[in-house]
Image (cartoon, rainbow, N blue to C red):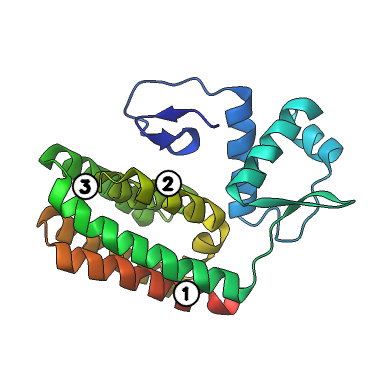
Amino acid sequence: MASEAAGLPIDEFDSRGPIVRPTLHDAIVARVRDMIIEGELPAGTRLHEGNLGKLLGVSRTPLREALKFLVSEGLLELSPGRGAVVRQFTAKDVHDSLIVLGNLEGLAGRLACEHASDAEIREVRQLHDRMMDMYEKRDRLPYFKLNQNIHSAILRLSKNEALVSVHNVLQARLKRIRYIGNEGPEKWAGAVADHEEMITALEARDADRLSKVLTAHMEKTWERVRHAI
């Protein structure tokens, strides 16, 4: 499993914290994941281990282990006779998953307002401010990773491990889909506006408002991505 620093995946950890040296496994997982998220490896692409290994400068054994991890995340799938293939989701797959994510996050928002400490809420505010810096720079991949960290952070603040576990599975699976939801200035601005409302509601500990914003955010995400699937 990828290393974690302060509860964040190694490719998304807070750069202000202690320096963590990623393992080769972590580095390969992060690189291939980013290639999938950014569309460098489109859905349906068969991953040729030899060619990919040469591109990344790694041998087949650690690459194969990294690909197995990405299969477990749901970004890749194993196809008989073809090996690892970038997973291709149907519109129904995505819509169904976003409905579940919206309801999970709505519940998490309520619990976070009840259980989070002031210090934990300030940490989410810091993530939000860093995300906004990336938005101002139009630096999309770092923006996206911070965006995902914020959603994960709110889930952790629910203090409900079962909720966090189920959410992690779906969030990992939909990274590429969520990424394309920011394509184009209008869609991106809409997602940012949702996040501004989220942080305001969280800081006010307004459980009803945060729950509604989080659930609606996933409904809007579907509208942003539905024509791109």
Residue appearing at x 70%, y 39% in the figure: 67
Rendering coords of residue 46 (x, y %): 81, 52
| Residue where numbered disc 1 is placed | 222
* Label 2 vs label 1, nearer the camera: 2
Rendering coords of residue 5 (x, y %): 39, 28
Does 187 sit left or right of 48 as displayed?
A: left
Q: In which quarter of the image is the N terminus?
A: top right
* Label 3 vs label 2, nearer the camera: 2
| Residue where numbered disc 2 is placed | 165
Residue appearing at x 42%, y 46% in the figure: 165
Does 113 sit left or right of 8 as displayed?
A: left
> Which image quadrant for residue 90?
bottom right
Does 31 sit left or right of 51 as displayed?
A: left
Question: Disc 2 and disc 1: Cα gap in Å?
Answer: 22 Å
The kind of residue on which mark 1 rests is Trp
* Label 1 vs label 3, nearer the camera: 1
